[in-house]
Amino acid sequence: MPKLLEVKDLHLKIEDADILNGLSFSLEKGEVFALIGPNGCGKSTLAYTLMGINKYYPDQGQLLLNGEEIKDLPINERAKKGITLAWQEPARYQGVTVREFLSLGLKAKGEEVTEAKLRDALQKVAIRPEVYLDRFVDKSLSGGERKRIELASLILMHPELIILDEPDSGVDIVALNNIADMINYFKDSQSGILLITHSQEMLKYADRAALLCDGEIIRQGKPDAISEYFQSFCGPCKKAEECETEVAS
């Protein structure tokens, strides 16, 4: 049986700069695979490449989803196959209500939009439906609230592969606890999760982990081992200050 995701010898160059340099890793259904590394090492670029966002098309390598090559598929086709990205900074949608935003995922999958489905998804992320369903997804909502609403939309879409890009960035403790709960929820639902982070604290949610530096995976293994190596490798690194890496003390 093929793995959910296989990335093989992935290379990406943008404006003559090598951003990804031969990345290879795999991800199983129901598994959390964490990629940790300093800011600017290529983590978000990998997320955009997996989604098929414009200009993030690899120059070399393979992207296999359930054994099928998806490297040349546009973003909408990848979304139909169940690839989703939870952005580091969730977007604001002027004039779009939470109800309308959540309904988009159901409509895209051809599923019926019901009040019960919307309310259940919001309750799973500790958002009160009666308060939020008719609010706008704009600057009136905090970053943590928008992240939780984004997670609710993922619940409704039942994705195969979830890419969480710096999920703990700019969130309060309530949102962070919800993220941890949702990681377990999606694991139990057999979704694969690619957890992208620069914080050692997030590695405790992973089954396996890898350290990414300058567009290359330099070590893979158990999260505890990668956390220790990350601390010893990135802590004394001469780039540490410019990378703004979170290394545990």
Image (tube, grey):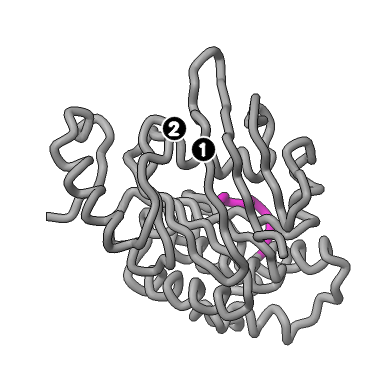
* Helix, strand or loop: magenta stretch: strand
Give, as a single range, the part of the protein colored magenta. Answer: 91-97
Query: Is residue 130 or residue 224 the one in the foreground?
Result: 224
**Residue 153 occupies quadrant:** bottom right
Q: On residue 41, which mark appears?
A: none
Q: Are there few (<14), some (14-19), or many (20+) residues within 10 Å of tag 2?
A: many
The reply to whether discs 2 and 1 touch (Cβ–Cβ < 8 Å) is yes
Q: Could you tell me residue 12's position as x and y percent?
A: 57, 27
Q: Earlier in the sequence, mark 2 or mark 1?
A: 1
Number of numbered discs visible in the structure rendering: 2
Q: Is residue 8 above or below residue 55?
A: below
Query: Is residue 106 or residue 32 the one in the foreground?
Result: 32
Q: What element carries label 1?
A: strand
Asked if residue 184 lies left or right of residue 239, the reply is right
Q: Are there few (<14), some (14-19), or many (20+) residues within 10 Å of tag 1?
A: some
Picture residue at 49% right of the left edge, 17% below the top: 17
Q: Quadrant of the C terminus?
A: bottom left
Q: On residue 23, which mark appears?
A: 1
- CA distance for labels 2 and 1: 7 Å
- The residue under label 2 is 215
**Residue 239 occupies quadrant:** top left
